[in-house]
Image (tube, rainbow, N blue to C red):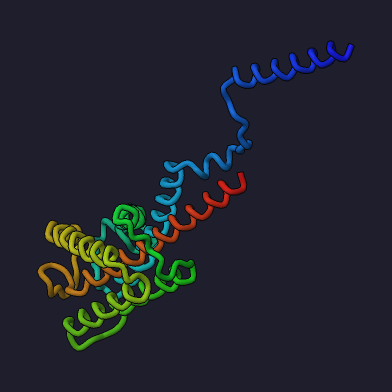
Amino acid sequence: MSRTLTAMSDSTVSGGQQQWSGSGQTPQPSRGPFNSVITNRTTNLLIRGAMLFSVGVFLALVLNLLQVQRNVTLFPPDVISSIFSSAWWVPPCCGTASAMIGLLYPCIDSCLGEPHKFKREWSSVMRCVAVFVGINHASAKVDFANNVQLSLTLAALSIGLWWTFDRSRSGFGLGVTIALLATLATQLLVYNGVFQYTSPDFLYIRSWLPCIFFAGVITMGNIGRQLALYEYKFIQEKTHQD
């Protein structure tokens, strides 16, 4: 009788093992649909891009309002179509550029193998945004004796913003490169009569405009880096929990 019971138990165990090995699968912790979405790289890029686009649109509306109110930037009357006194194409263009810059910065850091670790917290990013808004506000509101003094002052403030909140060589290089490209694009737009600057002193634009572009690139780069860091930490926590 004991031999019969032993044989039955052995056959049950061996049958279970064969059934498990036949399936060719190992037990894995269950993952809900929310976790799967959050840990998907493409979805994360789209979410970060949408957030950066929204920030860029908002800053463009607010900062361009300052320029228009002070008659620094002049648009033809027929292109102004919003309560923010801005051409309809300005916010989408700034939003798209912000998304590209914010996604490019952490990508460059990863390619260079130099993760940015200087002042990686949201309070620092918010201060960076505040300083950028202050620099733009100064370009529109503060009166200087001449444009050279204003340009030198804004250049010093922009470099100070980079030194305070970034200090990376890749950040400085990207900031200068994108600022030069944006300045060239603005020159072409003004040359073709899309809009104009009052009292231009650097071909068709103001000489301090590259400084504003540089400060904006550094600001959006910091936001993009912080979003990428937050995403990485969130995924790591979810992975450990699973």
Q: Quadrant of residue 191?
A: bottom left
**Does residue 183 lie above or below 70 as drawn?**
above
Q: Between 236 and 4, which is closer to the camera in this rendering?
A: 4
Identify the residue shown where x is 42% and y is 41%.
Answer: 42
Q: Quadrant of residue 71?
A: bottom left
**Does residue 45 lie above or below 185 as drawn?**
above
Which x, y percent locates residue 23?
59, 19
**Does residue 146 lie above or below 19 as drawn?**
below
Identify the residue shown where x is 66% and y is 20%.
Answer: 17
- For the C terminus, give its image quadrant: top right
Residue 52 seen anywhere in this rendered image of the structure: yes
Residue at the limit of the structure toward the left, as seen here? 203
Residue at the limit of the structure toward the right, as seen here? 1
Which x, y percent locates residue 172?
26, 67
What is the count of numbered marks?
A: 0
Which x, y percent locates residue 80?
30, 59
- For the N terminus, give its image quadrant: top right
Q: Between 9 and 79, which is closer to the camera in this rendering?
A: 9
Is 154 left or right of 146, judged from the image as shown? right
Is 64 left or right of 33, judged from the image as shown? left
Identify the residue shown where x is 79% and y is 17%.
Answer: 9
Is 134 left or right of 27, judged from the image as shown? left
Identify the residue shown where x is 37% and y is 72%.
Answer: 165
Residue 93 seen anywhere in this rendered image of the structure: no
Which x, y percent locates residue 25?
58, 25
Is 178 left or right of 60, judged from the image as shown? left
Residue at the limit of the structure toward the front, as seen here? 3
